[in-house]
RNA sequence: CAAAAAGUGUGGAUUAGGG
């Protein structure tokens, strides 16, 4: 019983839910009764990967075994629906909780508030917060951190800072999560100094993520030497650098033109477990493409393809773009087909790259094909797609077609920039 | 009390434009 329970927990924590479920079935077939905690773990495991339907199957089994769903189970499910973008259903489940004698707590509210926010329903998110407080449920540190992050990502810096002060008035002490939220959020708006100013008045704890946030912000400001200094400080203080640290540093060094340093660091860290992370490879690949070292880039691309490293849509998009920019539209087209055959799903970046590439190669048939694809896959043309086409028509002297497109933008509700 | 249950933060890619 303990062996099964511990192993199932382990698999769930490692994100290997399917294996956990396999063991779970074996466990039950041996007439061991999983306890409530094990059910909850497995349900949450499925929810965290957005697979609520499989989670519900487990809930069914759990109820048959005589357990009753509590607030933890409901929160997991609501979180799962939100992560899968099914906020409507999440809201319904939330509404059904009370009827089943289960009161939502601050965790439940946080899941749903974030879900509303991510789907653009800001008003409802704030309204829900109000309702929560009205019911006597008090916002805690995690909820404040969540709200501040949401506000920053929406560009509402002043409001985020107001909440930062408000939480302290309520006796909540900002932690390392608050710190990285401020550094990243304000840093992206070029306000790193405001973040430092705000944080200097509180004593936040530090962790690796907080260090990484600073480090990546410094890199984006072009302060690579300071970033390296911070990296050395991390080593001294015992914060083990991770794949985020390394890819931020490699990207920063490349963008600052310090190619030798970047490649040196890249080669130093990639033999380790990091090889399974595509980000750092893609950063280098993109750089090589953009400085015209196409051969080296393609060599690297093939190396990644043949390794165990998962190659994702970004890696393909970067490579396709590189092939277009180096005047090889046929190879780019081939790679796009190969990507689809491998089951890697193109996104709006990919389509925009293809659109621009085919426009510049004057391959009108392919342009039409991509536009059809965009409509059928729901990655419908956005502002960048229209800009690409408008620019193409203008440069081709087809101003009237560009004007037609401009009107079409308005009609389909895409905002010109 | 425990082997064990839910929410927050960090890294890579797309168009155009001036000198």
Image (cartoon, rainbow, N blue to C red):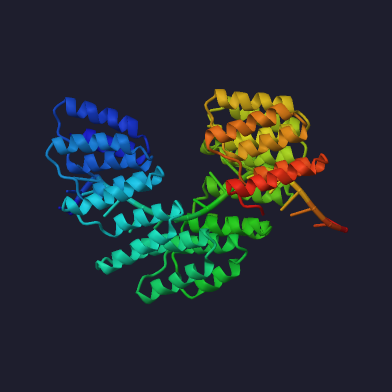
Residue at the spot 22% in from the left edge and 51% down from the top edge: A97
In the displayed structure, A144 sits above or below A364; it is: below
Count of numbered circles on the image: 0
Residue at the spot 37% in from the left edge and 57% down from the top edge: A113
Judge left or right: residue A360 versus residue A415. Answer: right
Q: Position of residue A368 (x, y in %)?
A: 67, 30
Depth check, front residue: A111 or A39 = A111
In the displayed structure, A124 sits above or below A241; it is: below
Q: Position of residue A104 (x, y in %)?
A: 25, 56
Please identify the quadrant where the N terminus of chain A is shown: top left
Depth check, front residue: A78 or A222 = A78
Judge left or right: residue A339 versus residue A206. Answer: right
Residue A38 seen anywhere in this rendered image of the structure: yes
Residue A233 seen anywhere in this rendered image of the structure: no
Residue at the spot 43% in from the left edge and 56% down from the top edge: A121
Q: Position of residue A182 (x, y in %)?
A: 51, 64
Specify the quadrant of the image occupied by residue A417: bottom right
Depth check, front residue: A191 or A211 = A191
Q: Position of residue A167 (x, y in %)?
A: 39, 71
Residue at the spot 54% in from the left edge and 57% down from the top edge: A213
Judge left or right: residue A98 versus residue A315. Answer: left
In the displayed structure, A412 sits above or below A136; it is: above
Judge left or right: residue A229 versus residue A153. Answer: right
Q: Which residue lies most toward the left here? A: A66
């Amino acid at each position: 019983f303990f062996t099964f329970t511990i192993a199932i927990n382990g698999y769930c924590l490692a994100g290997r839910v399917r294996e956990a479920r396999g063991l779970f079935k074996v466990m039950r077939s041996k007439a061991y009764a999983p306890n409530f905690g094990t059910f909850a773990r497995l349900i949450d495991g499925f929810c965290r990967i957005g697979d609520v339907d499989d989670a519900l199957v487990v809930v069914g089994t759990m109820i048959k075994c005589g357990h009753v769903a509590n607030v933890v189970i409901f929160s997991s499910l609501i979180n799962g629906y939100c992560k899968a973008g099914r906020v409507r259903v999440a809201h319904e489940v939330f509404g059904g909780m009370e009827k089943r004698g289960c009161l939502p707590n601050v965790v439940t509210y946080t899941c749903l508030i974030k879900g509303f926010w991510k789907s653009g329903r800001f008003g409802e998110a704030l309204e829900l917060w109000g309702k929560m407080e009205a019911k006597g449920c008090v916002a805690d540190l995690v909820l404040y951190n969540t709200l501040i992050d949401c506000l920053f990502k929406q560009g509402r810096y002043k409001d985020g800072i107001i909440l930062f002060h408000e939480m302290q008035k309520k006796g909540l002490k900002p932690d390392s999560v608050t710190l990285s939220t401020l550094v990243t959020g304000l840093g992206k708006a070029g306000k790193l100094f405001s973040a430092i100013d705000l944080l200097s008045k509180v004593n936040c704890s530090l962790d690796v993520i907080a260090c990484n946030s600073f480090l990546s912000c410094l890199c984006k400001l072009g302060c690579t030497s300071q970033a390296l200094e911070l990296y050395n400080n991390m080593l001294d203080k015992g914060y083990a650098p991770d794949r985020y640290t390394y890819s931020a540093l490699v990207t920063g060094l490349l963008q600052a033109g310090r190619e030798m340093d970047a490649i040196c660091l890249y080669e130093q860290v990639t033999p380790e477990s990091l090889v399974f992370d595509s980000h750092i490879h893609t950063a280098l690949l993109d750089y090589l493409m953009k400085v015209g070292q196409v051969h080296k880039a393609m060599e690297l691309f093939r190396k990644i393809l043949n390794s165990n490293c998962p190659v994702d849509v970004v890696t393909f998009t970067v490579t396709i773009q590189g092939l277009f920019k180096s005047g090889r539209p046929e190879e780019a087209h081939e790679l796009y087909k190969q990507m689809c055959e491998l089951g890697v799903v193109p996104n709006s970046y990919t389509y925009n790259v293809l659109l621009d590439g085919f426009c510049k190669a004057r391959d009108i048939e392919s342009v039409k094909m991509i536009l059809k694809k965009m409509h059928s896959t729901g990655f419908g043309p956005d502002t960048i797609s229209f800009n690409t086409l408008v620019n193409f028509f203008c440069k081709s002297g087809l101003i009237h077609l560009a004007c037609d497109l401009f009107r079409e933008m308005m009609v389909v509700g895409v905002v010109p920039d």
